[in-house]
Structures are given as structure tokens and as C-alpha cells.
């Protein structure tokens, strides 16, 4: 009878040893999800805040015209004396399609200049994208190889920066512009930059 009892407990012990790693994995997965799931990706800090905008020169998007003239590419000298909103975008970026109408509306504010950095995009697709939604950008630099985005510290597309009149980066928004963060975050940051010297 004792032998029978020992053989019954061995399978129970083995089943716990099989289930234990699964339980540990599930607990760790839940912990990571809770810790990472509640973070707002748009609040990722940038080492460039308070520093001069990168001296990135990018060529224009060929064939993109406004008022009969080629829209210029990116030159760091264009930031001096103006508050700029720099948006990194691409036609293949799904959230960029959602934020495009909001950028077009934002470009109506003549106190600022809206600058686009077109990231690793096909020029024809980029022009079609701007034709579809309207071109909010007074300046569009083409970052064909992604080097400019690296210099700007871009995590992913889209991202938006506010550059003050002094040419320094005042704010960085990671992720798309939404109606909510446009009014609650981006516009107040633009107003702060406009109020600054």
C-alpha cells in the first residue's frame, strides 16, 4: 500500500514541475505588460531638448511646388528668428495619414513655420500624399537614407518637434498628433516658444 502511494505522488510532482515554468512566464509577462502598458510613448525624453536643432541639410522634395515655386529643402539657418514645428513623416506611415489634416489646420497659424522631414519615402508617393491631404509644410527636406532622422534623435515616424526662435529644440512629441494632444500639449508648447525670447 505504501508503494502505491509513492507512485501516485510522483506524477503529481512532475505535473507541477511542468506547470511551474508556465506560471512563472505568465507572471513575468503580466508584470512587464503592466509596467510598459501604462507608459505614454509620447513622453519619451529627448537629449536634444534645450540644444540647438541639428545642423541637418536635406534636399527638397523635387516636383513639390507652392505658389509656382519649388518648396525648399531643409537648411538649419531657416530656424533662426522663427518658431518652427518640425514634423517627421512618410507616406507609408499609417498614423501620418491621421495627423495630416491636423497639421494642415496647424499651418494656418502664421506665427509659426511648419517644416517637414520626409523619412525614407518614395518621392512620387510623398507628393501624392501631400496632394491628397494638402501641403502644410513651407519647407520639406528629404531624408532618403534616414541619416537626418538619426541626427534629430527620431525613435519612429511620426514625430514632431517645436524649435524656438533661438534655434533650440523646445519640445518633442513622439507619435502622431491627435486632436487631443494638439490642443492639450502641442499648442501650449508652441505658445511657450512664441512667448520665449
Image: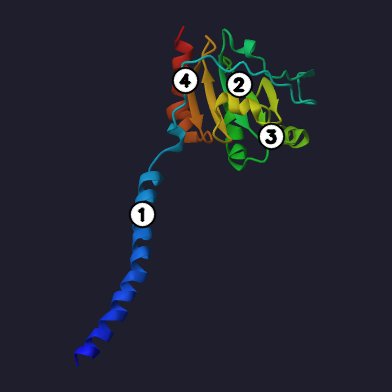
Which is nearer the N-term, disc 2 or disc 1?
1
Which is nearer the N-term, disc 4 or disc 2?
4
| Disc assigned to residue 28 | 1
Distance Cα–Cα, label 3 vs label 2: 19 Å
User: Residue 154 at what x, y percent from top left?
Assistant: 56, 30
Tell me whether the residue at label 2 lies in contact with that at label 1, contact meaning CB atoms closer than 8 angstroms: no
Q: What residue appears at the point 58 percent right and 18 percent down from the top-left corner?
A: 54
Residue with the mark numbered 2: 114
| Disc assigned to residue 120 | 3
| Disc assigned to residue 96 | none
Q: Is residue 19 above or below residue 96?
A: below
Tell me whether the residue at label 3 lies in contact with that at label 2, contact meaning CB atoms closer than 8 angstroms: no
- 42 and 20: which one is in front? 20
Distance Cα–Cα, label 1 vs label 3: 37 Å
Which is nearer the N-term, disc 3 or disc 2?
2
Graded by Cα atoms within 10 Å as few (under 14), some (14 to 19) or many (20 or more), the crowding at tag 1 reads few
Graded by Cα atoms within 10 Å as few (under 14), some (14 to 19) or many (20 or more), the crowding at tag 3 reads some
Amino acid at each position: 500500500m505504501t508503494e502505491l502511494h509513492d507512485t501516485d505522488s510522483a506524477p503529481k510532482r512532475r505535473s507541477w514541475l511542468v506547470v511551474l515554468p508556465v506560471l512563472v512566464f505568465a507572471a513575468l509577462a503580466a508584470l512587464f505588460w503592466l509596467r510598459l502598458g501604462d507608459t505614454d510613448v509620447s513622453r519619451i525624453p529627448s537629449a536634444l531638448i534645450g540644444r540647438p536643432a541639428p545642423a541637418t541639410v536635406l534636399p527638397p522634395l523635387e516636383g513639390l511646388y507652392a505658389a509656382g515655386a519649388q518648396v525648399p529643402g531643409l537648411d538649419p539657418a531657416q530656424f533662426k528668428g522663427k518658431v518652427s514645428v518640425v514634423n517627421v513623416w512618410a507616406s507609408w506611415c499609417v498614423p501620418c495619414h491621421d495627423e495630416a489634416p491636423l497639421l494642415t489646420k496647424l499651418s494656418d497659424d502664421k506665427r509659426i513655420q511648419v517644416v517637414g522631414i520626409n523619412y525614407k519615402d518614395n518621392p512620387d508617393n510623398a507628393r501624392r500624399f501631400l496632394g491628397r491631404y494638402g501641403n502644410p509644410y513651407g519647407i520639406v527636406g528629404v531624408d532618403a537614407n534616414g541619416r537626418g532622422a538619426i541626427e534629430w534623435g527620431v525613435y519612429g515616424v511620426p514625430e514632431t518637434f517645436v524649435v524656438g526662435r533661438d534655434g533650440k529644440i523646445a519640445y518633442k512629441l513622439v507619435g502622431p498628433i491627435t486632436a487631443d494632444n494638439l490642443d492639450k500639449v502641442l499648442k501650449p508648447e508652441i505658445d511657450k516658444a512664441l512667448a520665449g525670447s
